[in-house]
Image: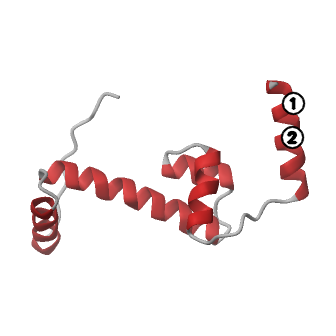
Amino acid sequence: MPTKTLSIRIDERDYQFLAAFAEEEKEDVSKAVRELVELGRLHLAVEKYRSSAASLEKAARIAGVSVSRMMDILRDFGIVANLELEDYRNSLNTARLLF
């Protein structure tokens, strides 16, 4: 996937954290930031789903993963899916169309 360059301003404390984190992980600061953004997306998706501010599909989009992977992630976090019977029926109908 092509990458984009982003310039941001952060305070000294956050920069020192990033630099130390990158050094501990034996990577450059850019890679550390990318890892933290990925973790932040995942955390945001989990919290939005937990608070019912996002559907399963939207949470998956936020996290940048498939719906099935998002279901696994939520299970790993101990979050019970708030799916309704209609959601299961829609999934079954979609599966029937695919197979």
Q: Is residue 87 above or below residue 83?
A: above
- Residue at 60% from the left image edge and 63% from the top image edge: 74
- Residue at 31% from the left image edge and 28% from the top image edge: 2
Report the side of 33 relative to 87 (left or right): left
Foreground of the two, 94 or 41? 94
Q: How far across and down, in percent of the image, does residue 60 sit?
A: 58, 49
Report the side of 57 relative to 61 (left or right): right
Q: Amino acid at mark 1?
A: Arg
Q: How far across and down, in percent of the image, does residue 90 sit?
A: 86, 43
Foreground of the two, 17 or 69? 69
Name the mark on residue 24: none
**Quarter of image, res 95:** top right
Dot 2: within a 10 Å radius of its alpha carbon, few (fewer than 14), some, or many (20 or more) residues? Answer: few
Report the side of 15 relative to 66 (left or right): left
Report the side of 59 relative to 42 (left or right): right
Direction bottom: furthest residue = 13
Name the mark on residue 96: 1
Dot 1: within a 10 Å radius of its alpha carbon, few (fewer than 14), some, or many (20 or more) residues? Answer: few
Question: Which residue is the site of mark 2?
Answer: 92
Considering the image in quadrants, where does the N terminus appear?
Answer: top left
**Quarter of image, res 16:** bottom left
Q: How far across and down, in percent of the image, does residue 92 sit?
A: 86, 40
Q: How far across and down, in percent of the image, does residue 85 sit?
A: 90, 56
Q: Secondary structure at mark 1?
A: helix
Q: Secondary structure at mark 2?
A: helix
- Residue at 68% from the left image edge and 67% from the top image edge: 52
Q: Amino acid at mark 2?
A: Leu
Alpha carbon separation for disc pair 1 and 2 = 6 Å
Contact? badges 1 and 2 (CB < 8 Å): yes
Q: Is residue 3 above or below residue 13?
A: above
